[in-house]
Image (spheres, rainbow, N blue to C red):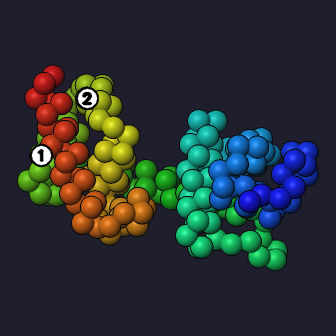
Amino acid sequence: MLKVLQAKAKGYSDEQLFDGLLENHKGVLEHIYREFYPMVRQKIRQLGGQEEDARDMFQEGLLATWQNARSGKFTLREGVRLSTYLVRVCHLRWLEKTNKASSRKEQAVETYEERGTDDHVLSRWLKREDQDEFTRIFGQLGERCRNLLQLFYYERQDLTSIARELSIGERSVKNEKYRCMQRLKKVYQLK
């Protein structure tokens, strides 16, 4: 359990922050948001991002840091502060996102049809003039389905990468992708 967490917010050591992050301690998480978010915001803004981008990257980076800490991929060691690690994760995620965005712009829309039979609905929507309709229908799916379909079809990640990112088995990704596509088709037919 966390020791000395009754200390003032500014008084958390890196060890206390790390332990509090692992335990989802409310006070520690509030401290991390308050103290580390401005660093992430500054970094993302320097790289051409907006406030909303910084918030998104902070959320993703904090989740990744938490997952890496829980899995043992990230541990505190001399010379590595939690704040430095978190800002670096956010920085790398932003670079990855902007690189993917620029490469997506270069892809022809027709390449989406080459992915197989169950994505024809998504392919048609990507070609449609009415992107608002697609966004509305796609938004009716749950967050996990939207995320999974976006990773597979839009970001073009393979099942192995998606499984690693979502921390689930590859077979589960395949099954879940199928179920999500079925939901998407059902919502599309109801429109």
Q: Residue placed at 76% from the left, 43% from the top? A: 27
Q: Can residue 131 be seen in this view?
A: no
Query: How far apart in space, not on screen, are marks 1 and 2 (Cα)?
Result: 15 Å
The image position of residue 88, as x and y in percent, is 67, 61
How crowded pointer 1 is (Cα within 10 Å; few <14, some 14-19, many 20+) is rated as some
From the viewer's perspective, is the residue at label 1 or at label 2 nearer? 2
Q: Label for residue 120? A: 1
> Does residue 14 sit above or below 28 in this rendering?
below
- Name the side, left or right, on which 76 lies relative to 180: right
Q: Is residue 80 left or right of residue 138?
A: right
Q: Nearer the viewer, residue 107 or 65?
A: 65
Q: Which residue is drawn at 62% across and 47% down?
A: 58
Which label was assigned to residue 137? 2
Residue 81, how many percent across, how many down? 78, 65
Residue 49 picture quarter: top right
Give amino acid for label 2: Ile
Residue occupying image coordinates x 19% and y 48%: 179
Circle number at residue 47:
none
Q: What element carries label 2?
A: helix
In this rendering, the answer to whether 75 lies above or below 57 is: below
Left or right of 68, for residue 37: right
Q: Position of residue 9 (x, y in %)?
A: 86, 45
Q: How crowded is mark 2: few (under 14 residues within 10 Å), some or many (20 or more)?
A: some
For the question of whether residue 122 can be seen, the reply is: yes
- Quarter in which the N terminus is drawn: bottom right
